[in-house]
Amino acid sequence: MRSPSDSHSAFGEKLQFLRKERGMTQIDLSQLSQLSKSYVSFLETGVRHPSREVVLRVAEVLDPEALLGLKDELLILAGFTPEDPAELRQKPLKSTPGRKDFHSFLQYSLQLIRQGAYDLARQTIEQGFQRFHKPAQMQTLLAHLELAQSRFEQAILLQQTALQHAQLAPQEQEPGLSEIDLILNLGVMFFLWGDQALFAAEPQLDLASQRYLKALHEFEKGLRKAPAHLYLLDEAGRVHFNLADLSAAESAQEHWRSAIACFRAVLAHPDKQQLSLEILRESAAFLALAFCKVESFVAAGLLLDSLSLVPEPDWLLRYVQACYHSLYHRQDPEGGHLQRALACLRQAIALNPAARAQARQDQHKDLAVLAEVCSQEFEEVAQCE
């Protein structure tokens, strides 16, 4: 299992439902929409997020006469606004209150990019050019504009230039923007570039690892300057998590231990509420799975039990619990873990059908014991196209 930068399951679930309702296979939809079958599969499982253009293309196939209002619904589920982007560009900047300083503005635009709301991100960034005119600010806005169009190399080059200017002329920077913010920004760009390689139609694992290592280099550089920086700690934990999943055994253990240290620092941070509850719960779930990977099952179990006290159902928590019980079975074969793993996996899939695809990916890794010992039950639970 890998640490996602965001969850896009709502769009994928709706797309899968509409496709099946019309009696279409993924191949049918891919041919009619001129998308690859693997890309359609990634959209349905939430691995990939669509551009606005892809949403419109799919909506035209599923609702060719535009009688059902699916276009607007799918746009909203994918994080886009139904309004014409040309009209949105004319809206005054005051329509986005609360982003008074450049740091907050950057966080907002980056959040839009990570959610896949690329059109809205571009519109927001273009508005930023009307407000922020210092050299490092302009370079960073240009970098975000490139990032919103998935032009990673150009974005990274621009961000590196902005960072160099900030280091050479710190007196020209806005008081609310620090060198650390720009380092964090650069690291996130490498992280997202790694995601692009990892979640491509034909995954490029070595390339993803190289880019994640560059992201880690930036996060660690920032942490040397600000060891308690909340956002750097969380991003570093996530990139260590992904690197561990992609690494050979010995290197993986180092990354798992580092991920544990980062996530523990995040959860113990006095200002952790600056992160959303969803992000904190994700980080806690990833921490529990990292504990399992270093065979600290008692710590993992205590953390998962604590997380399960929250009344709202959480598919990721249930999925990690399934992995925990599957992994723990080797150490405690008489503990009834496999039946618990099956129960948790069923709950995860009921809450989010995309968990089926994740289970398929993990059947030789985190869920390997469950898939091997309870093969028939696993096939029944995880069965998907």
Image: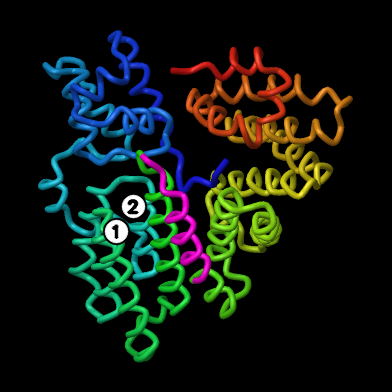
Determine which residue is flagged by label 1: 147
Q: Which of the 4 image quarters holds residue 220?
A: bottom right
Question: For the residue labelled by badge 1, is the local secondary structure a helix, a strand or a loop?
Answer: helix
The percent coordinates of residue 123 (x first, y second) are 20, 54
Task: Provide the secondary structure element on which disc 2 rests.
Answer: helix
Horizontal side, residue 182 vs residue 272: left or right: left
Task: Tell me residue 146's x, y (percent).
Answer: 24, 61
From the image, state whether disc 2 or disc 1 is nearer to you.
1
Q: Amino acid at mark 1?
A: Leu
The residue positioned 44% from the left and 61% from the top of the image is: 211
Q: Is residue 267 visible?
A: no
Quarter placement of the N terminus:
top right
Q: Residues within 10 Å of mark 1 (few under 14, many from 20)?
A: many
Q: Which residues are magenta?
A: 202-217
- The residue type indicated by label 2 comes to Ile
- Label 2 crowd (10 A; few <14 / some 14-19 / many >=20): many
| Residue at 71% in and 34% down | 308
Left or right: where 30 falls relative to 9: left
Q: Main secondary structure of the magenta part?
A: helix
Q: Find residue 113 and name its label.
A: 2
Image quadrant where residue 64 sits: top left
